[in-house]
Amino acid sequence: METAAELGREIAKGRLDPVDLAQETIDRINAAPEQGSIFARLTPDRAIQEAESARKRQKQGDLKSPLDGVPISWKDLFDTTGVATESGSNLLRGRTPGKDCVALEKATEAGLVCVGKTHLSELAFSGLGINPSTATSPNKFGSHLAPGGSSSGAAASVAYDLVPIGIGSDTGGSVRIPSAWNDLVGFKSTHGLISIEGAVPLCSGFDSVGPLCTSMEDAWLMTAIMAGMKPMLPEAKPLSECRFLVNETIMLDDLGQDQKDGFEQCVETLKSNGALVDRGNIEECHDILPLGPIVFPYEAWQEWGTEITAEPDMMFEPIRMRFESGKNISKEAYEMAWTKMMELRASYNQRTSGYDAVLAPTVAIGPPEVKPLLSDFEKFGATNMLALRNTRFFNMFGCCALSLPTSKPASGIMVAASGGSDEQLARIGLAIEKALA
């Protein structure tokens, strides 16, 4: 499939009709054997109506953005007017919002066409993407493998060539993990850059929005649109002007062979293209690691504890157990952990201030088989935490980050920059993408 930007250029030149594109996309989704495990529900009437508006704008020479008329999918935690938005949980069955979330409003204003809502991990609280409560989306490399989460359906909708962009959310890795396991580009924006108003919350201190797609161009244009910025592609920063740090603390431990080889090959490619790459220990990782099991479960339980307590049997047990791990965390313990995290965030930013970005394998392991994890909840929990390990650091450090595919299947290289430097990260990502190609 063409990228979203390529489709947008064809629309602008009058060589592609947005209505035809929308109908072809809907037909392709309906014909896909995996459709039911990728999409929670489709929005064909809305899609055609939005495409008809794009058609009129194209004929009038008044397109709203480079992606005007392009169809995309939305993770089923983004509120959509009059369409059930259930966040992958039976606890929210039938929940139907009366208005679009802000990110969808921004996309609609830019002419993007909403074709449907995709499945996810239950209430977005798992990096594996396994959800027996609603549906487990397929991995690009086989439906027997975990797709990555929580934006599992968003990744599958792109990996299975159904749409060029899937919109996901990232609280601890939920854009980057499924991107890595499906050979996609995933962009985790800085917390607060894109409004989360109207998105079903998980952890308000960490929830962020980001696209999953097949190119850095698409990733940045979509990020800019949702952030209310002018969607212009910046120039790639020459790699000869880039300085990177490979963190050898924790993030390189217990790597799968493909994840290790794919990452190291990428590092060598960057060096051969003129980038300066240092290797060292980010000691803050050791100190911040124990704070994760406090801050994330506490926020998640504060958000959903009442509903879970009322109907605990409605949830897949390992996910419920993870929520319940926040039940007995006191507000005082949370506030102390948060204060310590902010101190470590400042220390991390100071330590890495001389670098354009920190590099790490996106995920330590490749996608595990689904079936064994459904019957062994202890293994499910341990595998989930290992999948989230590398990505979650950068949520706690307040970074923006992206994942790019490597030469090895289901492995990614993560590029993390300081919070607020999203456009600079895009410039670096464009250069890295070109070098890796």
Image: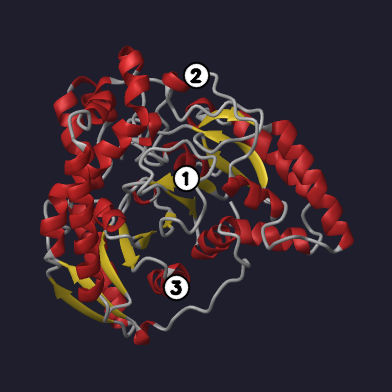
First in residue order: circle 2 vs circle 3: 2
Given the image, on which type of amino acid does mark 1 rest? Gly
Classify 155 as above or below 432: above
Q: Which residue is mark 3?
A: 434
Left or right: where does residue 435 sit relative to residue 341? right
Cβ–Cβ under 8 Å for marks 2 and 3: no
Q: Nearer the viewer, residue 159 or 252?
A: 252
Q: Distance of mark 2 from mark 1, alpha carbons?
A: 20 Å
Seen at 29% across and 55% down, the residue is 362
Q: Position of residue 150 (x, y in %)?
A: 38, 39
Q: Distance of mark 3 from mark 1, alpha carbons?
A: 24 Å
Q: Position of residue 340 (x, y in %)?
A: 18, 56
Q: Position of residue 426 (x, y in %)?
A: 46, 69
Classify 115 as above or below 412: above
Seen at 30% across and 39% down, the residue is 299
Left or right: where does residue 165 sit relative to residue 377? right
Q: Position of residue 177 (x, y in %)?
A: 33, 48
Q: Mark 2, mark 3: which one is toward the viewer?
A: 2
Q: Which residue is mark 2?
A: 93
